[in-house]
Image (tube, rainbow, N blue to C red):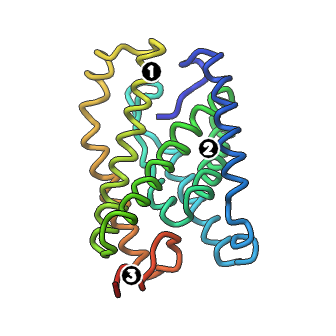
């Protein structure tokens, strides 16, 4: 899923830097820095989750450059820390991944595709569910975690495929033949693992989830 420098036009990769920068500046402005800087526990949780996500992202299985799969885990990350810290953390993780692989020109595009996009989808679904559906534990686990993770991963793959086809990096026929048939095998485990992690956190460490509250989901 990670893009390399040679796959996309240089001007497109350059333009992605401005979009990433604008979103990053907004995320930094609205991030809960006071809560993070005054809570050593939150700092440790944020660092630990970021390291775990980094270790997940460096392993990828694929058939061709960019046509691969790796567990995103972004939905859990977003439900733990919210949109702004999710975007900032995912961007820093992608920076660390780029240090390993060296595809610096594609850094912004990768951060947008694998960080900003799934974080935004995950948080958007959470906001809609929280606003319009009953505050029920099952709804939170199934929709905000399981379904949400599958949707975020699916949207990410769709954006990747659209980008590769639009830039004529690969033909849609080739992607349909070599990549998309494996999509169901990727989406269900993504949803299942995110759902399981959220379930464990609710049971053992509900205070690690910024978007969850026992008073709302268990006693409402």
Residue at horizontal 68 percent and vertical 66 percent from the top: 32
Say which of marks 2 and 1 sits in front: 1
Residue at the spot 40% in from the left edge and 77% down from the top edge? 202
Q: Which residue is mark 1?
A: 164
Residue in the image at 33% along x and 22% along y: 175
> For the residue carrying disc 1, how many other residues have a C-alpha within 10 Å: few (<14), some (14-19), or many (20+)?
many
Reading the chain from its start, which is encountered first: label 2 or label 1? 2
Question: Please, what secondary structure does the residue beneath circle 1 have?
Answer: helix
Identify which residue is drawn at 48% across, 64% down.
Answer: 79
Tag 3 residue: 203
Quarter of the image for the C terminus: give it.
bottom left
Indicate the secondary structure of the residue bearing disc 2. Answer: helix
Are circles 3 and 2 on residues that touch, CB within 8 Å?
no
Q: Which residue is mark 2?
A: 94
Residue 45, percent across and down? 60, 71
The location of residue 114, given as percent across then percent down, is 51, 41
């Amino acid at each position: 899923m990670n893009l390399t420098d040679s796959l996309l036009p240089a001007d497109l990769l350059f333009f992605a830097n401005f979009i990433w920068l604008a979103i990053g500046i907004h995320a930094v402005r609205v991030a809960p820095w006071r809560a993070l800087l005054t809570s050593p526990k939150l700092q440790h949780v944020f660092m630990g989750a970021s390291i775990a996500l980094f270790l997940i992202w460096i392993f990828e299985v694929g058939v061709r450059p960019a046509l691969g799969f790796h567990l995103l885990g972004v939905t859990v990350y977003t439900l733990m820390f919210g949109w702004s810290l999710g975007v900032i953390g995912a961007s820093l993780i992608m920076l660390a991944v780029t240090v390993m692989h060296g595809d610096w020109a594609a850094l912004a595009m990768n951060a947008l595709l694998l960080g900003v996009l799934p974080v935004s989808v995950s948080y958007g679904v959470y906001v809609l569910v929280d606003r319009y559906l009953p505050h029920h534990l099952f709804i939170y686990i199934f929709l905000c975690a399981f379904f949400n993770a599958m949707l975020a991963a699916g949207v990410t793959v769709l954006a990747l495929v659209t980008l590769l086809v639009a830039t004529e990096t690969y033909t849609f026929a080739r992607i349909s033949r070599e990549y998309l048939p494996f999509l169901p095998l990727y989406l269900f485990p993504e949803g299942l693992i995110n759902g399981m992690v959220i379930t464990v956190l609710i049971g053992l460490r509900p205070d690690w989830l910024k978007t969850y509250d026992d008073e709302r989901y268990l006693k409402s």
